């Protein structure tokens, strides 16, 4: 009977440690999601602030405001799609292909020159 009680206590301890690990993983996922939302909010705020500053600095020049708005929109788009952009650029780079090595021919002379 004592062996059953001992085994039951060990199983409950290991189940509690697995539950604690799941809690830690869930906490990490929530923290990551919150950080991503914060970064996106910061990108939107900086984009709007950039357009307003350019409008004030150029005294309302419409062309400068439009260019600043386009630049801010591209910045915000990159902040929202950074993983998709990374994957697309990574697949298109020529360095992503397989490495081809070339072998030198064996030396003809006895000295390996």
Image (cartoon, rainbow, N blue to C red):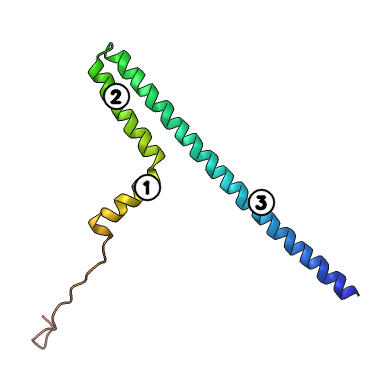
- Where disc 1 sits, the SS reads helix
With 61 as the anchor, is 107 left or right in this view? left
Q: Considering only vertical position in the picture, is 25 above or below 10? A: above
**Quadrant in the rendering for residue 65:** top left
First in sequence, mark 2 or 1: give its number: 2
**Quadrant in the rendering for residue 64:** top left
Q: Distance of mark 1 from mark 3, alpha carbons?
A: 29 Å
Packing grade of label 1 (10 A; few <14, some 14-19, many >=20) is: few
Tag of residue 84: 1
Q: In which quadrant is the C terminus drawn?
A: bottom left
**Quadrant in the rendering for residue 59:** top left
CB contact under 8 Å: marks 2 and 1 = no
- Between tags 1 and 3, which lies in front? 1
Residue depicted at x 39% and y 22%: 49
Packing grade of label 2 (10 A; few <14, some 14-19, many >=20) is: many
Residue depicted at x 11% and y 83%: 107
- Which residue is tagged 2? 68
Query: How far from the left and from the top, in percent, is residue 97?
Result: 26, 62
């Amino acid at each position: 009977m004592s062996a059953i009680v001992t085994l039951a206590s060990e199983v409950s301890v290991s189940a509690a440690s697995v539950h604690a690990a799941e809690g830690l993983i869930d906490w990490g996922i929530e923290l990551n999601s919150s950080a991503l939302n914060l970064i996106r909010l910061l990108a939107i705020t900086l984009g709007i602030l950039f357009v307003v500053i350019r409008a004030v600095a150029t005294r309302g020049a419409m062309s400068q405001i439009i260019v600043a708005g386009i630049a801010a929109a591209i910045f915000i788009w990159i902040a929202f799609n950074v993983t998709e952009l990374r994957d697309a650029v990574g697949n298109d780079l020529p360095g992503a292909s397989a490495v081809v090595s070339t072998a030198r021919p064996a030396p003809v002379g006895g000295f390996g020159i």
